Image: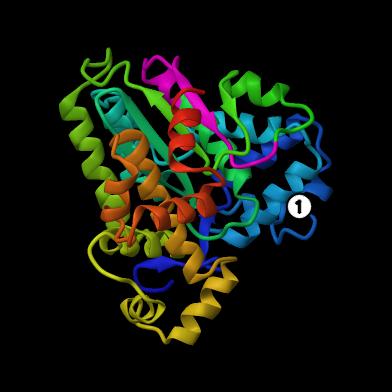
């Protein structure tokens, strides 16, 4: 692996965990296993080997095959429900002992590479809402497949942690499917399609309450074990996630260029561009995505004005910001606030 991050062809998924559960669910659902595995680079004998790993690219191929045989996406949504129970037990214990909605989401954000390496979370909170945005850590290929899985898994987590899951709005960056019954069954009826981002807007029902199972000592011990796992196994963030973290720390303080970003990752600008292309992205895409996430967080959760948001993002004037925001999201800032908060 590369220093500080993993790439799309680095082997990060243990086959006897996440891939094995998807394959088992597919078998139960009657999916032809030969067709499911065809061209993915994953083989049934690999599942028996606890040390065998596959790359993010191979995992994506497996997901793509699953969707070909399950147009309703119910298989992925069922898989999402299982996800909290197939990742590291220490992380689940930390989540079960979270002190409220915000604390649970913060733990999930901080240890997303333990939970599901392909996706990371951007969290913005105030006293009333939590805005949990889902982003692909390593590739933008069919990102909505991962996002549906993650949303279903968060609902399962809320249920396990005795957190009410009422008052949740789901934003999906995809067209409304012909058959949306499975999505409504697993996520509920508050689904906003063709959204500018994939995200969950969660009302704060439990932020100031202790949960039934909350134990501060147990949570601290579990988080200590999570840190030990990260250190011992040298678990890393995805390449695009690492770029996002670099940009989000600097985009409000300084002008960022492709050259300065490449220098941070200790590679040449040409290599940086090639690597981004391999991950189905570009520097401008990542810069725009970072500004979009920050702008939405500031407008929706921070309740900042367009003018203040533009200044914070170092965009020269409000007219420029409005044009940029519409390019990023397909709507003006005022429309985004109205439509997304009042959906």
* Residue at position x 60%, y 22% in the image: 186
Quarter holding the N terminus is bottom left
Height in image: 152 above or below 285? above
Is 80 situated left or right of 218 in this image? right
Q: Secondary structure at mark 1?
A: helix
Q: Which residue is mark 1?
A: 37
**Furthest residue to the left?**
217
* Category of crowding for the residue at label 1, using alpha-carbon neighbours closer than 10 angstroms: few (below 14), some (14–19), many (at least 20): some
Confirm whether the magenta stretch covers residue 124: no
Residue 34 percent across, percent down from the top left: 83, 49
* Residue at position x 41%, y 54% in the image: 319
Residue 8 percent across, percent down from the top left: 55, 65
Confirm whether the magenta stretch covers residue 169: yes
Camera sees residue 55: no
Residue 145 percent across, percent down from the top left: 63, 43
* Residue at position x 72%, y 21% in the image: 181
Which segment did they paint magenta?
157-175
Q: Which image quadrant for residue 25?
A: top right
Q: How many marks?
A: 1
Camera sees residue 108: yes
- Depth check: 121 or 316 in front? 316
* Residue at position x 34%, y 68% in the image: 4
């Amino acid at each position: 692996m590369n220093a500080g991050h993993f790439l799309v062809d680095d082997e990060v998924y243990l086959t006897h965990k996440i891939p094995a559960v998807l394959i088992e669910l597919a078998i139960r659902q009657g999916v032809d296993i030969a067709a499911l595995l065809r061209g993915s680079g994953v083989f049934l004998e690999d599942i028996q080997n606890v040390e065998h790993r596959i790359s993010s690219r191979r995992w994506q191929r497996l997901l793509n095959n699953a969707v070909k045989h399950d147009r309703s996406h119910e298989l992925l949504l069922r898989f999402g429900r299982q996800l909290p129970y197939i990742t590291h037990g220490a992380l689940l214990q930390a989540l079960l002992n979270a002190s409220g909605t915000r604390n649970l989401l913060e733990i999930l954000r901080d240890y997303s590479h333990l939970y599901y390496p392909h996706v990371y979370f951007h969290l913005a909170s105030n006293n009333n809402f939590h805005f949990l945005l889902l982003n692909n850590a390593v590739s933008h290929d069919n990102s909505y497949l991962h996002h549906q899985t993650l949303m279903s898994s968060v609902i399962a987590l809320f249920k396990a942690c005795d957190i009410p899951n009422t008052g949740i709005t789901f934003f999906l960056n995809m067209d409304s499917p012909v058959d949306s019954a499975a999505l409504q069954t697993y996520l509920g009826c508050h689904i906003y399609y063709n959204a500018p981002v994939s995200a969950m807007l969660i009302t704060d029902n439990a932020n100031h309450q202790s949960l039934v199972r909350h134990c501060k000592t147990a949570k601290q011990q579990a988080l200590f074990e999570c840190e030990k796992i990260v250190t011992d196994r040298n678990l890393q963030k995805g390449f695009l996630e690492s770029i996002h973290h670099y940009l989000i720390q600097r985009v409000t303080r300084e002008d960022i260029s492709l050259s300065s970003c490449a220098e941070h990752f200790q590679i040449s600008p040409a290599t940086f561009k090639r690597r981004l292309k391999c991950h189905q992205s570009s520097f401008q895409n990542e810069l725009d995505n970072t500004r979009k996430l920050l702008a939405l967080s500031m407008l929706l959760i921070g309740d900042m004005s367009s003018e203040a948001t533009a200044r914070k993002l170092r965009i020269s004037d409000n007219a420029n910001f409005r044009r940029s925001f519409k390019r990023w999201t397909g709507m003006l800032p005022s429309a985004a606030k109205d439509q997304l908060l009042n959906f």
